[in-house]
Image (cartoon, grey):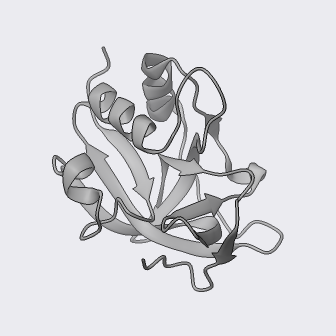
Amino acid sequence: MLNGNLSIFVYGTLKKGYCNHSFFLSEAKRIQKAFTWGRLFGLIQGFPALVTSSDLILAEGGFDLQADLEIQHETPSYPVEKPEGDWDQVYGELVQLPRPYFHMKKLDRLEGFVHPGPCLYRRVVVPVISREKCTSAWTYVMEDVPEGKRVKGGVWLP
């Protein structure tokens, strides 16, 4: 079992002060403001969805959690500029969690990333920028956004 921390970028209900934070992220070792590039949508169901450029996806999550946790630690960080196209800075939090296997399993269930069958979100590694530093972190993205409104400014508010 992999030791170390799980790095995850959250942009919606998991942010500090929002409805899912205390249940899912109460053990966070560190939380810092951060952003990634994408398009943020407020869905009619009351939660957000992030769409990002395929050029920014550094790794794709699967259903082997151990392999996925190793991917996070093997994925290099690099400076990233705005990708070509209609992308915004999407603001959220970069969260460091202990017990990576436990937390990733819990977060996957919340985000509808389950096996077998179709998934609500995909879990991917993207570059995340915080305090002028770029790092790699897991986040949850959608490919096909159901009915919702694009959030200009990149900050989701319920």
Residue at image position (58%, 85%) is 153
Residue at image position (61%, 70%) is 40
Q: Which of the image's four quarters has the C terminus?
A: bottom left
Vertical comparison of 26 with 101: above or below: below
Left or right of 83, for residue 125:
left
Q: Which residue sits furthest front? A: 45
Residue at image position (28%, 63%) is 19
Q: Nearer the viewer, residue 141 or 97?
A: 141
Vertical comparison of 29 with 47: above or below: above
Q: Nearer the viewer, residue 119 or 88?
A: 119
Q: Quadrant of residue 61?
A: top right
Number of marks drawn: 0
Q: Position of residue 42 (x, y in %)?
A: 57, 72
Q: Position of residue 38 (x, y in %)?
A: 66, 66
Q: Which of the image's four quarters has the N terminus?
A: top left
Vertical comparison of 106 with 37: above or below: above
Q: Which residue sits furthest bottom? A: 153
Q: Position of residue 4 (x, y in %)?
A: 27, 31
Left or right of 126, for residue 111:
left
Left or right of 67, for residue 28:
left
